[in-house]
Amino acid sequence: MSGFVRKEICEGVAFNSIVDNRFKVGRLGATLITPLSRETAAANALLACVLTRSCKKYPDFTALNRKLNGLYGAALYASSGRMGDFQSITISASGLDDRYSLDGESVQSELAELLCEILFSPRIIDGQFDSEDVEQERRQLLEDIDAEYNDKRAYAINRCIENMCRDELFSIGRGGSREDVAGLTQDKLIKAWKTLLDRSRIEITMLGSADPEKVCGRFENIFVKKPRRMNGSTKIVSAPSEVKRVIETDEISQSKLVMGYRCTYPKTNREIVASQLMSAILGGTPTSKLFLNVREKQSLCYYCASRVDKEKGLLMIDSGVETENIEKTESAVTEQVELMKKGAFTDDELIAAKLAVKNAFVSSLDSLASLQSFFLGNILREDPLSPAEAAEICESITKDEITELAGGIKLDTVFSLVGN
Amino acid sequence: MRFTERKNEHLNETYYTAIHESGLKIVICPKEGFNSTYAVIGTNFGSINSTFIHDGKKVTVPAGTAHYLEHKLFESEEGDAFARYAKTGASANAYTSFDVTCYLFSCTERFDESLEILFDLMQSPYFTEETVAKEQGIIGQEIKMYQDNPEWKVMMNLLEAMYVSHPINTDIAGTVDSIAEITPEILYECYNSYYNLHNMILCIAGDVDPEEVLAVADKKLKPAVSVKTESVFPDEPYEVGKKYTEQALPVSVPMFALGYKEKAGGEFATTKEMLTTSILLEAFAGDGSALYRRLIDDKLINGTFGSEYMEGSGYRCVMFDGETKNPKEVAEIINSAVRELHKNGVPEEDFMIAKRSVYGRIARSCDSTFSLASTMINDEFTGRDSLFASEIIAGITLDDVNERLKEQLDPDNCCLSVIKGIAEYSDPQIGNA
């Protein structure tokens, strides 16, 4: 149940590894973290797509994909995420552990080489990425942004956050707006590539049975003399001035209600775990307050759930209901939130939440992707939590600690997407 | 009773299988060093088993009954199973598919207690007018949620258009109207017909001792008399019912699903047939294929493009789906590529690459207790053997793939399903205003 072994290559660049031979795949990733900015967010997001489409060695996506497929269906992932007011770009490669390859080849060292090719030797000719690559990836990223609207649950939550945080960097999202992506130039992309490699905070993660030494060496050679320091901080709004109400209508069968709350920013690891417990008691399990009262008692919905964004200090509650039940659902949710704020939960509720949250923490030790994402999700913290530590802390959190955090919950925005 | 042990030496995975005296079949895949254990118990009663013969009587139940029963089985006279799981910390759930209903939990401690709850919940049906009525609102909202889900609708509409009489053409959860007809008596009838331990399978993947599982089974399972229930399916023609179907939903990127219906009897495809189809689809439409290249170059598809093989009692089809700005053009290109494929077969190099890719996928799925247990239970219901898939695949030749192709992807027997935007909402700029 050990955590990552961390080695600082230079200031701002670290190599983190877990050697674990339980798995049949290995996973290697590079995460580049930078303050969210309207100027660069879209460029960074598109860059991640362009980089994973081709490189000097595999100059088009068919050549690259055939290489990956031949390596027993290895995969490259590019993703752009938001952590508080920071953006993280992660490029990961995952593929078969060498012990299971059929012809004795080392998939893991090939993947390490490939990830380096992708990051450091993209196909740049005369100072430009291939224009076909850029246009294809731009089109797909735009379609991806547009398609957020296809998933009404996710769309409603996003719209609530956009309205809630409209004057904050957070509202830029994980990769900027449609217009930002549409307006990107080659120069901006090239600049994004250079800036990310030279100035962003970089966390390399390697998980699996392979020996990290050699792979770490590759990155050391590249970064050892390139220290950097990332500035910036996340704006935390603890007291919204007044409750905002936003209503949109659409041709849908089921209306969506999203209630966005500000809550106390969890500063310590104990507070992080306590905030997870708070959300679990309120709306994180099939025995939570929202599930039992809004769904089971009142039969208002199929789902009514809460989740916490620990880096931004948000609590989001969402449900899908009949249009005529929107108000009734809002009252039912408010009633449960008020109970939570007063600390009106029983020992049984607390124990159930602890067991459920602990189960989730410990389960994440069984997947390389979960281990990687848990680690990265806490990386902005001085003393990043590991799942094992989180599970241990969970046991000793008291009712008072949770009540104190819950006391800081304040309603900020109510968003409804109403069916016609 | 003893466990039969079977081991795949290369992948280092072992299955332990036994039939408990109660009639329940148990399959266990021990995963040393894993923290979470995943257990799933299921019966071969899914949404398509809506007509059956039990005790010499032919019964037809409303659409959505299997799924409704799944929801209601969590309640017993003593209370709610979720409340009991809350005391062990297990994360519990259930699902109903076209072919099966499964109940599951995953846990990192107190496995025995959670398994006891799972066994109890299977054996203590409790349906009253009141409890059945309470679920109408909840499932009604679940149904409406799916009605707004374009990915789900594009597939359901496709099945509805392709299949004329087979109940695969009906939504798993039914409709708000059909579930209004469900009564406690109907639920008991289904329970008594299909929830018989001789008819059920328990699969477990995790760091467990098979003997420990048996001990819990001995304690909790009541010996059952074997019940024979026969599902009845109407005759289904080979030809698709319709060639085209479309629906307008508020989407900003349209979606398509192109289905190729094939000949299907009562039997399931074999492990080798399934693997051969996987290789075929990977070679033909995977992200390294000429077809994929063409569709991307023509700006017709994006990363959501994929292919899938669906098969069960009385239905078999290959499906291609994804987002596209021009569904008809995508369908035309795929279908002419299908014609070419039948003419020329799969290129040798594409076959070799696809085979390695599919092997990797099999090995990869052993890393998750969830995918292992899901594969194991699926195997049991279909008579397949995924434990040795990595060995079976090694023996598959290019000839096998081209031979299999003859029964699949009939270019004259396909159907296109489209979800298009609603005019005033299809422009994302308005959607975001």
Image (cartoon, coloured by chain):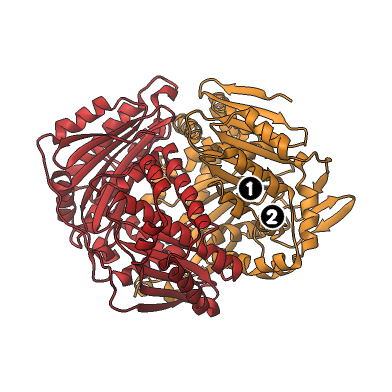
Chain colours: A red, B orange
Q: Find residue B276 and report its horizontal and vertical position in percent.
A: 57, 34
Which residue shows up at 74% across the image and 65% down it?
Answer: B182
Residue B139 shows in this picture: yes
Q: Which residue is mark 1?
A: B103
Q: Note whether B422 is above or below A100 in the view shown.
A: below
Left/right of residue A46 with respect to residue B191 in the rendered view: left
Residue B226: x and y, percent? 83, 40
Q: Quick check: do tags 1 and 2 share a chain?
A: yes
Residue A277 position, x and y percent, is: 42, 55
The answer for which chain carries disc 1 is B
Residue marked by disc 2? B73
Q: Position of residue B280 (x, y in %)?
A: 53, 37
Q: Nearer the viewer, residue A177 or B249?
A: A177
Q: Residue furthest left?
A: A225
The kind of secondary structure element at disc 1 is strand
Tell me the kind of residue under disc 1.
Tyr
Q: Is residue A98 above or below residue A151?
A: above
- Is residue B59 or residue B320 the one in the foreground? B59
Query: Quarter holding the N terminus of chain B?
Result: top right
Q: Earlier in the sequence, mark 1 or mark 2?
A: 2
Left or right, A220 with respect to A164, comes to left
- Residue at the image position 53 percent from the left and 45 percent from the top: B338
In the rendered image, which quarter contains the C terminus of chain B? bottom left
Q: Amino acid at mark 2?
A: Leu
| The quadrant where residue A98 appears | top left
Tag 1 near tag 2, CB within 8 Å:
yes
Chain on which label 2 sits: B
